[in-house]
Image (cartoon, rainbow, N blue to C red):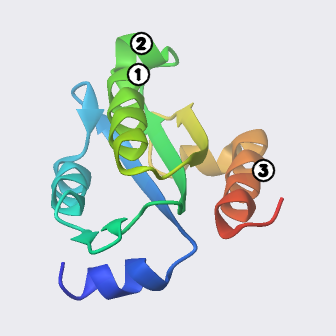
Amino acid sequence: MRLVYPVLKKARGLVIASPVYWFSVSAQTKIFMDRLYAFIGPKGHGLKGKNIGILLTYGDVDPFSSGAVNALRMFQDAFTYVGAPIAGMVYGSANAAGEVNENKALLRDAATLGRQVAGGA
């Protein structure tokens, strides 16, 4: 993470993408989130004021029964705590590799989110 923190410091924002496994984000995403806790400097948390985008995929069409709601709540709580506004969240259902690519509306939403995180609408 000591290589990642300087990159995050210069970034306008951050997009985090994860599949939902067993009612939460992947283990790799959770580890990344846990390590962000230590990204504190003399002016507060290193993500303070940076735009955050969240992208999730999951197998069930219902964000509650799939566990996506748990992941979304974790992001909301963590980024509210550090003062980083969530520019938006895009999440959708998929059961097979590449299936999300067939959902054109979801891809448009993801592109819009990318622009919002970068600071342009």
For the N terminus, the image quarter is: bottom left
* Numbered mark located on residue 64 in the image: 2
Graded by Cα atoms within 10 Å as few (under 14), some (14 to 19) or many (20 or more), the crowding at tag 3 reads few
State the CA–CA distance, disc 2 to disc 3.
Answer: 23 Å
Q: Up-down: is 56 above or below 59? A: below
* Foreground residue among 82 and 51: 82
Q: Up-down: is 59 above or below 86? A: above
- Mark 1 or mark 2: name the one nearer the start of the chain: 2
Task: Count all numbered tags in the image, as a single digit.
Answer: 3
Q: Up-down: is 8 above or below 77? A: below
State the CA–CA distance, disc 1 to disc 3.
Answer: 22 Å
Q: Position of residue 15 (x, y in %)?
A: 50, 60
Residue ID at (51%, 47%) = 55
State the CA–CA distance, disc 1 to disc 2.
Answer: 5 Å
* Numbered mark located on residue 69 in the image: 1
Residue ID at (46%, 39%) = 57
Q: Nearer the viewer, mark 1 or mark 3?
A: 1
Q: Up-down: is 18 above or below 15? A: above
Q: Secondary structure at mark 2?
A: helix
Tag 3: residue type?
Answer: Arg
Graded by Cα atoms within 10 Å as few (under 14), some (14 to 19) or many (20 or more), the crowding at tag 1 reads some
* Foreground residue among 10 and 28: 10
Tag 2: residue type?
Answer: Phe
Q: Position of residue 48 (x, y in %)?
A: 44, 60
For the C terminus, the image quarter is: bottom right
Q: Position of residue 13 (x, y in %)?
A: 54, 67
Tag 1: residue type?
Answer: Val
